[in-house]
């Protein structure tokens, strides 16, 4: 077993690692650290989120930096301000015993004047987002002529977010002689183009977990209709009272709605998405890290860079649109020898997507049943009984009142009184959990708990199906046509997600769905037709205007599947 003590790091860096109890390096650290220490060759490192990339580049770079040269020696680019702040904090902790090394973070949403002042006071390591970094370069404040290490963290995310031109300008502002270290979860064509243009014969290092597995993470899924997702999440939390985790949503609206619903029902929850101002985001994250809130409901982009220790759960509201995002998200739990659970709240049409994630990442999902009302009532009663049965400090006033009551109750009636008190406590707990719509549903399709995903057909119909076995086709249903198809990358989960987005919790039973090359059709109840046409047509899909109208069923695409 390799340990950090075997690396030729500075004694001051080793001292900081010992205080942090860092003993055994992760795979990416074991491969990257020696290379940076012993070579000036550029690196492309392929590694997933949560694998310890900051230490992989931070420890060796700090060990090679000069504490005499007070110019900017290291620049680190990250896709979001949260990640930039997290990297800066880590770099400060690694350089705790290197007093002449100064680390600052620059990012949008915060005072640029304060950041300019910090740079002018002196900085050796600058961590930041591409937009703010380029702004400071153009203002003549950030001078990169002396940069020796250029690090691009989460490069694939930066490129997806449209920062390719900014990154190119920043790289062009740095010396040819620098060492460039690029870290990414995937190897895209754009990253290859960046490598060809700005890197010199880079060595490629892959440090993915074997087959995508992390044995500390248990992967679960629950089949839940969209209308019941909040209730299912609340009940799952009731059955797991020690939960401390992140809930991932696809859209800002969904994140806000789920966060508001959780808060309304008394669950301490924070919400993060693109419309939250930076000052508020900072307060939300501080509260979450201090465990003042046990839930953080967030969109993917808003959650980039969030690194919180000891998360017990990662919850996915629906299967991520990009399957590789599942591993990114899940990697936030099950760290540092801790166990974690990654659970997907999926709807009936997403079982194929779950199966695909299994195949891509070598993991196995376990299906868990949707919690019933009686399950959470029993769990609450058991917790109450255990609390009564446990030793706890009783005040003198309480003893006084109980003694007075006992004196007035004949011994033979004590058992009856105790039973009445328990019945009263149980009734209170039953009242806490009113019956929901999902409790009234009978005979919902549900497979037995299993390891792996089984195919299922349900109330949403089947893609390309004919004959109506899985749908609600027929009387009371009309066919709607949407101006998107396979050429627009439209899938059944996307379409159902758009319908759920505008239905706002109302039950809309969707019948047969057909995805054509340029159009798609779906059956919907007649009373929802006007609303779906109007509200879906007011949205966009991947930047493209959407049109929904009544029409004839679209012919199935001839594309092989």
Image (cartoon, helix red, strand yellow):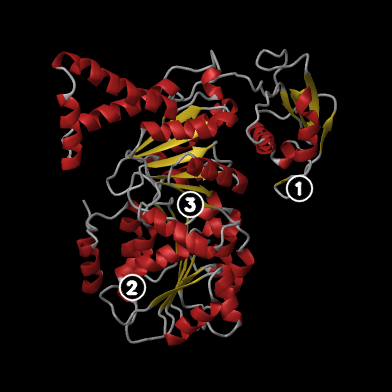
Residue 263: x and y, percent?
49, 44
Specify whether residue 212 is in view.
yes
Q: Earlier in the sequence, mark 3 or mark 2?
A: 2
Location of residue 121 by image quarter: bottom left
- Left or right of 531? Residue 28 is left
**Point 28% across, 55% down: residue:** 25
Residue designated by label 2: 62
Q: What is the CA distance from the residue labelled 1 to the residue labelled 2?
A: 46 Å
The vertical placement of 147 against 418, above or below, is below
State the residue in front, 273 or 219.
Answer: 273
Q: What is the CA distance from the residue labelled 3 to the residue labelled 1?
A: 28 Å
Q: How many marks?
A: 3
Q: What is the residue that sits farthest to the right in this orientation?
A: 551
**Point 70% across, 21% down: residue:** 511
- Left or right of 516? Residue 120 is left
Q: Secondary structure at mark 1?
A: strand
- Left or right of 490? Residue 293 is left
Label 3: how many residues lie within 10 Å, few (<14), some (14-19) or many (20+)?
many
**Point 46% across, 43% down: residue:** 327
Q: CB of mark 3 within 8 Å of CB of mark 2?
A: no
Q: What is the CA distance from the residue labelled 3 to the residue labelled 2?
A: 24 Å
Label 2: how many residues lie within 10 Å, few (<14), some (14-19) or many (20+)?
many
Q: CB of mark 3 within 8 Å of CB of mark 1?
A: no
Residue 237: x and y, percent?
41, 35
Specify whether residue 554 is in view.
no
Residue 126: x and y, percent?
45, 75
Please tell me the numbered disc located at residue 544. 1
Q: Earlier in the sequence, mark 3 or mark 1?
A: 3
Please tell me the numbered disc located at residue 185. 3
Tag nearer the camera, 1 or 2: 1
The vertical placement of 90 against 288, above or below, is below
């Amino acid at each position: 077993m390799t340990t950090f003590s075997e690396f030729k790091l500075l004694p001051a860096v080793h001292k900081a690692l010992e205080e942090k109890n860092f003993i055994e390096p992760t795979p990416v650290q074991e491969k990257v650290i020696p290379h940076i220490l012993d070579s000036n060759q550029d690196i492309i490192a392929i590694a997933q989120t949560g694998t310890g990339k900051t230490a992989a580049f931070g420890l060796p770079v700090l060990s090679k930096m000069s504490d005499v040269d007070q110019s900017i020696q290291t620049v680190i680019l990250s896709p979001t301000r949260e990640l930039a702040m997290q990297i800066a904090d880590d770099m400060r902790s690694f350089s705790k015993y290197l007093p002449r090394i100064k680390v600052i973070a620059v990012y949008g949403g915060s005072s640029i004047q304060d950041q300019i002042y910090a740079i002018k006071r002196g900085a050796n390591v600058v961590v930041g987002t591409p937009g703010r970094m380029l702004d400071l370069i153009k203002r003549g404040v950030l001078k990169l002529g002396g940069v020796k290490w250029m690090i691009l963290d989460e490069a694939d995310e930066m490129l997806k977010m449209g920062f390719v031109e900014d990154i190119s300008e920043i790289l062009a502002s740095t010396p040819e002689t620098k060492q460039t270290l690029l870290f990414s979860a995937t190897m895209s064509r754009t990253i290859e183009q960046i490598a060809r243009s700005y890197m010199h014969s880079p060595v490629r290092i892959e440090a993915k977990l074997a087959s995508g597995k992390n044995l500390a993470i248990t992967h679960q899924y629950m089949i839940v209709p969209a209308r019941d997702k909040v209730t299912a999440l609340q009940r799952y939390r009731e059955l797991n009272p020690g939960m401390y985790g992140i809930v991932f949503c696809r859209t800002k609206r969904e994140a806000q709605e789920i966060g508001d619903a959780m808060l309304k029902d008394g669950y301490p929850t924070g919400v993060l998405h693109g419309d939250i101002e930076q000052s508020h985001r900072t307060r939300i994250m501080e509260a979450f890290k201090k465990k003042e809130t046990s839930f953080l409901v967030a969109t993917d982009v808003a959650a980039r860079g969030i690194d919180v220790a000891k998360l017990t759960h990662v919850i996915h509201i629906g299967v991520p649109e990009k399957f590789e995002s599942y591993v990114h998200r899940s990697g936030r739990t099950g760290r540092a020898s801790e166990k974690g659970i990654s659970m997907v709240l999926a709807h009936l049409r997403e079982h194929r997507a779950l199966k695909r994630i299994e195949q891509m990442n070598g993991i196995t999902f376990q299906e868990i049943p949707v919690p019933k009302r009686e399950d959470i009532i029993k769990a609450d009663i058991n917790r109450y009984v255990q609390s009564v049965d446990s030793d706890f400090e009783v005040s003198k006033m309480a003893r006084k009142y109980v003694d007075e009551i006992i004196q007035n109750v004949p011994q033979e009636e004590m058992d009856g009184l105790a039973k009445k008190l328990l019945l009263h406590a149980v009734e209170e707990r039953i009242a806490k959990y009113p019956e929901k719509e999902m409790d009234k549903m009978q005979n919902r399709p549900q497979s037995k708990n299993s390891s792996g995903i089984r195919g299922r057909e349900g109330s949403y119909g089947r893609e390309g199906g004919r004959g109506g076995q899985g749908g609600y086709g027929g009387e009371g249903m009309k066919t709607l046509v949407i101006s998107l198809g396979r050429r627009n990358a439209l899938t059944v989960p996307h379409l159902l997600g758009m319908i759920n987005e505008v239905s706002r919790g109302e039950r809309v039973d969707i019948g047969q769905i057909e995805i054509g090359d340029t159009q798609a059709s779906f059956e919907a109840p007649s009373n929802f037709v006007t609303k779906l046409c109007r509200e879906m047509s007011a949205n966009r899909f991947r930047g493209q205007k959407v049109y929904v109208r009544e029409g004839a069923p679209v012919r199935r695409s001839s594309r092989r599947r």
